[in-house]
Image (cartoon, helix red, strand yellow):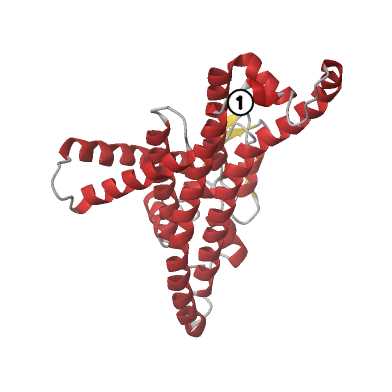
Amino acid sequence: MAGESQTTTGYIRHHLTNLTYGKLPAGYERLDHNGQVEEVLEQPTWTLAHSSQEASDMGFMAIHLDSMGWSIGLGLLFCFLFSRMAKKIHSGVPTGWQNIVEMLVEFIDNTVKDSFHHKNKMIAPMALTVFTWILMMNAMDLLPVDWLPHAMGAITGNPHFFFKVVPTTDPNVTLGMAFSVFALMIFFSIREKGLIGFIKELTLHPFHAPKWYVNVLLVPVNLILESVSLIAKPISLGLRLFGNLYAGEMIFILIAVMFGAGLALGLFAGVLQWAWAVFHILIIALQAFVFTVLTVVYMGMAHHVEDEGQEH
């Protein structure tokens, strides 16, 4: 909840700012929480950002330590839980964690069979990894927004310590995953169609004419259209996940602000928080599913090779 020493705007900004490690230039004036100059850097310095402005000034090479920590940590947790279950799995009636794992595997396997009609043993395990990993990262949004930031503030002795706990509310994470999918799309496209076939796909579609000299004129148009379509896939894939989770986190933060606005609004906020958490469970699972399905669909498109007779 927003404390007395922190404005509502400051509270919201604090919860939406990542723990950022980056480089500040020489001569940079670092301000305290009151906006007064606290320190002037004598030389370029790698350090933790003390404010959202410092995080912005660190530029492209800055690292969001909280997003990296949570995403990698949850990924390792996924590997540990599933590898442990793989060693203990039995052919009897599944119970407990084995039942959950088998349901997930069967669900993803059916999804892949419906969307991917080619032979590649990597796609189903990748889809399972993507779905479960994103689901775990999204589920961090169900934790009360103040718990972990306050815990880190108590540990560090700095109540204003930045600490975002939902990796998928960081576009660096979602776009990073999306561009990894994009890299696999390019790899499989070239592997299945050959480099020449991939170039033809970009330059001879969607417009194609029987005469070669007409095709020469159409190549620039096709290249622009296909390139835009190709690049739009990872961008939309990453931004869709980020936008939905960021909006959900923002609503949780706004509800938390209401707890500090009196007893009546506090009780109303409690009801809203419960209702939004129940609804948000659907969003969490749905967004993980959408990302996974689109990933599988894009892999199918990369593996699809048209017959020469259909091209002309």
Residue at the extreme front: 309
Q: Mark 1: give few (<14), some (14-19) or many (20+) Cα within 10 Å.
A: few
**Residue 210 horizontal/vertical position (percent):** 80, 21
| Residue on which disc 1 sits | 306
**Residue 147 horizontal/vertical position (percent):** 40, 60
Which quadrant holds the C terminus?
Answer: top right
The answer to whether 280 is drawn above or below residue 182 in the figure is below
**Residue 73 horizontal/vertical position (percent):** 37, 40
The answer to whether 227 is drawn above or below residue 172 in the figure is above
**Residue 208 horizontal/vertical position (percent):** 78, 26
* Residue 13 appears in view: yes
The answer to whether 296 is drawn above or below residue 44 in the figure is below
| Residue occupying image coordinates x 27% and y 40% | 82
Please state which amino acid type lies under the numbered disc 1. Answer: Glu
The number of numbered badges drawn on the structure is 1
The answer to whether 172 is drawn above or below residue 182 in the figure is below
Q: Give 179 or 148, whichever is nearer the viewer.
A: 179
* Residue 28 appears in view: no
Q: Give 167 or 6, whichever is nearer the viewer.
A: 167
| Residue occupying image coordinates x 55% and y 49% | 241
**Residue 28 placement, left or right of 253:** right
Residue at the extreme bottom: 264
| Residue occupying image coordinates x 58% and y 43% | 237
